[in-house]
Amino acid sequence: MDTENIWQRCAAYIEERVGAALFKLWFEQLRVVRVEEDRVLLRAPNKFYVEWLNDNYLELLNDAFEEILFKAVNIDLFADTDSGDKVLGSEDILRAELLSIGKDSSGKPQGAVKGVVKGINLRYTFENFVVGPSNQFARAAALAVGDSVGKTYNPLFIYGDVGLGKTHIIHAIGNRVVQKNKKASVIYVTTEQFTNEVVTSIRHEKMSELKQRYRNVDILLIDDIQFIANKVQTQEEFFHTFNALYEKQKQIVLSSDRPPKELGDITDRLKSRFSMGLIADVQPPGVELKMAILQNKAETHGVKLPSEVAYYLATRIRSNIRELEGCLTKLAAHASISGEPITQMLAHEVLKDVFQDDETPINMDGILKIVCEYYGVSITDIKAKKRTKDVTVPRQVAMYLARELTEMSLIDVGKNFGGKDHATVIYACNKVEEKIKEDENFKRTIEKLRNRIKP
Ligand code: ADP
Ligand code: MG
């Protein structure tokens, strides 16, 4: 099969799954440039395609090629305008360089493996992180940590809502550390990956290797630590990893969607360790910061974004920066296909699906979904009569928010929770109000939930 042939068959596979319209928009212009042993080079018209496809359709592309080639391959997308080295994947090259620095390390003090860099994404740096009032504290703390590893704040605990730049900041620390000290050992790992590694290591009796890997780094960056809740063995292992690193004055950086105190089912000894250093939060960005991020991104991609369109996007997207970027990407791709300039009209047209969500009225289902997601409890449990501690608070919060954000009566609210009477609902609302007055963290949680529910 030649490359053209391969692509035609993949294209058919894809079109069948996404439909003609989406196919025409995102896939029709792709071309297979080269098929290697375990890699396919795929050319897209511009960077926006590359980004959009990587974020949204990589799995589908993988499936398609696997189906046609009868084996799993890596898909390397690149933009038509990219220079030659990009084709080879400049990130891969850099990473390979970084790893090879690790290999020829001489003199390993105390058996430490020097210069191992794992999991760091070179795309996320301090240089391309736009600062505003909502994130400057976390950024400054991260910068301080990147500049004096293990000596300033240990651990650094960064928390904030989804899509506000936590992962970006954490990688930026890693990149900074490697830039300054080529011999530094840095590992970035998501809590999910760490959990999987623990489970696999236990199963294959490879725990000592896992210990060796994680306890000998200069800096451990661990993302989304809230997912360690309920994972007993992982917590146990992480506790010892934490202590080992801490004692050697090695740096630990954690991210989470909530402050340590509010982490669900996590042992107290871990929670208290998370609070030992500095806790920094990232708040939702204001309109100005959102505009600055958009302009910054547009500029690096060579796109003309009029400020009224930036303003339009910044006011329509509530807080999630990932969503904001997604909108710009989509908009720019449309503009480049149609050859039209980016205008507010085009933005309105292209993004109406994205914005539509904002106009749907608030109802009980929406509230329950967000509250349950946040507390990690199931909707069935919260609606049932059950009276255990872990559903009591979420249930009271859901009742409170339903009263505040909808027109529902006390009785109607109660009906959603296994037929509770109106007195129970009043009691719940009072409880929540009291707690809001007493506990600053709880107050913020309620605000956060309210923002997620309310457009
Ligand atoms: P989180 O981990 O908090 O969910 P991410 O770090 O994944 O969020 O950020 C989502 C996207 O927004 C990323 O592409 C990131 O680069 C971008 N982003 C977030 N904050 C900023 C910022 N201040 N400047 C530039 N890009 C940002
Ligand atoms: Mg993240």
Image (cartoon, rainbow, N blue to C red):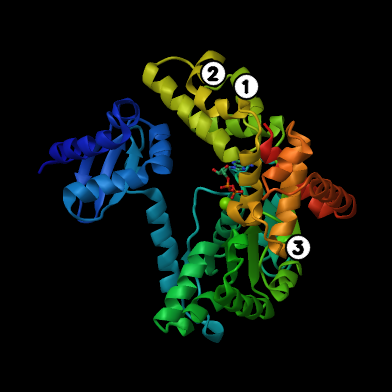
- The x and y percentages for residue 195 are 51, 69
Question: Which residue is under mark 1?
Answer: 312
Which residue sits at x=55%, y=77%?
A: 233
Q: Are marks 2 and 1 in contact (CB under 8 Å)?
A: yes
Question: Which residue is under mark 3?
Answer: 261
Under mark 3, the amino acid is Lys
Secondary structure of the residue carrying tag 2 is helix
| Residue 59 vertical placement versus 385 (above, below) | above
Mark 2 or mark 1: which comes first in sequence? 1
Foreground of the two, 417 or 83: 417
- The x and y percentages for residue 421 are 77, 47
State the quadrant of the C terminus. Answer: top right
Under mark 2, the amino acid is His
Question: Which residue is under mark 2?
Answer: 348
Foreground of the two, 125 or 223: 223
State the quadrant of the N terminus. Answer: top left
Under mark 1, the amino acid is Tyr
- The x and y percentages for residue 107 are 50, 82
Q: Is 34 placed left or right of 235 in the picture?
A: left
For the residues labelled 2 and 3, the Cα–Cα distance comes to: 42 Å
Q: Which of the two marks, 1 or 3, is nearer to us in this view?
A: 3
| Residue 111 vertical placement versus 360 (above, below) | below
Which residue sits at x=18%, y=47%?
A: 68
